[in-house]
Amino acid sequence: MSADLKVVSYFFDDEGGRELAAILSRVEGLSLTSTKVVSEEQLSTLGKEELPDVVFFELDGHAERHIQDLELLLKEHRGSVSVYVTYKEVALDLVRRMMRIGVMDIFPQPLQTQELMSAMAHAVSAKRERIKASQGAKGGVTAFIDAKGGVGSTTLAVNVAHVLAQKHKAEVLLIDFDLQFGDVAISLDLHPRSTVLDALRQPDRVDTVLLSALITKHDSGLDILPSPGNLTSLDELMADPVRKILQAAVQDYEFVILDLPRFFNAGVIEALKFSDPVMLVCQNSLETIRNAKVILDNLSLIGVSLSAVELINNRAMAKSSSVTIDKLKSTLGKERIHRVRNDYAAAVSAQDQGLPVASVDKKSDMAKDVLALAEYILHAHRGDNKKKQGFFARLFK
């Protein structure tokens, strides 16, 4: 199932179709096919091949056959296709009839840009949620992002991906979207010939074949799509190429781990929307907590669901911690926070050698907590982490 929302429109004149196309061209994640109504049989052919997600139909108020076809379409494909109607002049009783047969919404002409864009953006988001649900996608794409620069999201992304690939033998792709300062490759002592930039610059060619040609393999079985690690313009990180890379990645990999830069342009926002969970990495310091709160307060405004966001208290229990865990929870409004304990010696030694922490000291507190974090993501995705239910819970399930 493609993540793009497929929209088919039917208008009696070309002007209406052009007006709709101009509005919908501003909605990301949507593809439109415009058709001029020339016969009464057009609607009845829908569903014979690939069914669109949305049908946008201009109603002239007189074509009873078209109304019957819309009703039949909604009966046969309810839940799979949504119908929106637009009109220039139409009787009120006809509008009521449209609502009764299950038309999603009705837009008088001239079309109102903001109202229509909002409806289609909601439809795009709803389709993405359906795809996630059908794939059991929680944990399938996991993003790591710092609440404040240098708090350790890259280290956690690398080590979690390594555990999933080596210990659990999962198919894992680690993508470093930090174009300028990404150091995933350095963290694993790799010398890649290709980078994620090669995919970003040719979005029309992005598919599983291209990705397999660009990845760098680690001895653990982990696949890496590294950052170029230079002062590449951040404009290279655009929404459409990022979306196509992730759509291709989830076809070949059970787990896709993202290391994201700490800025919020269109590409990063697209990656965040695609991810569940989004691991926001914090520390017990006032500055980090303040930054985390700013991020949490604004994510929903850019279309990222707060229900997908989870917090990691990295370098927990360090002597320099100035804020208690209870204060961290209450300030950020999260009852549960993942803990990764501080182990400076093991972390630095691993970084200097280009090795995962578990390869340096598998008994360290940090290695144990990374293992627990990886297993949390594994179980969330595979759905086998349900606790044993008590007698009454099983009885009334």
Image (cartoon, rainbow, N blue to C red):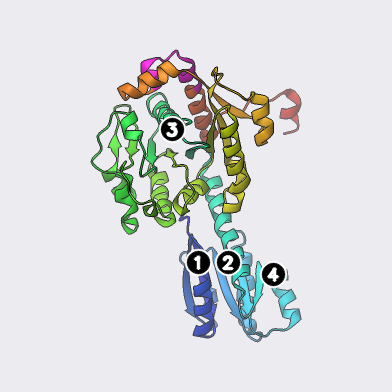
Residue pointed to by mark 1: 26
For marks 1 and 3, give the CA distance: 33 Å
Q: Mark 1 is on which residue type?
A: Arg
Please determine whether, in this image, residue 135 is positioned above or below residue 189: below
- What distance separates the C-alpha of mark 4 from that of mark 2? 24 Å
Of circles 4 and 2, which is in front? 2
Q: How far apart are the two marked residues, 4 and 1, measured between alpha carbons?
A: 30 Å
Q: Residue furthest left?
A: 193
Q: Secondary structure at mark 1?
A: loop
To which residue does mark 2 refer? 117
Q: Position of residue 396 (x, y in %)?
A: 75, 32
Q: Nearer the viewer, residue 154 or 40?
A: 154
- Residue 186 % position (x, y): 31, 31
Inspect this view and state whether residue 247 appears.
yes
Mark 4: amino acid: Ile
Label whose residue precedes the other's in the sequence (4 or 1): 1
Q: Secondary structure at mark 2?
A: helix
| Bounds of the magenta segment | 357-369
Q: Is most of the magenta stretch helix, strand or loop?
A: helix
Mark 2–mark 1 distance (CA, rounded to whole Å):
8 Å
Determine which residue is flagged by label 3.
157
Residue at (69, 84) in percent of width and height:
90
Q: Is residue 359 magenta?
A: yes
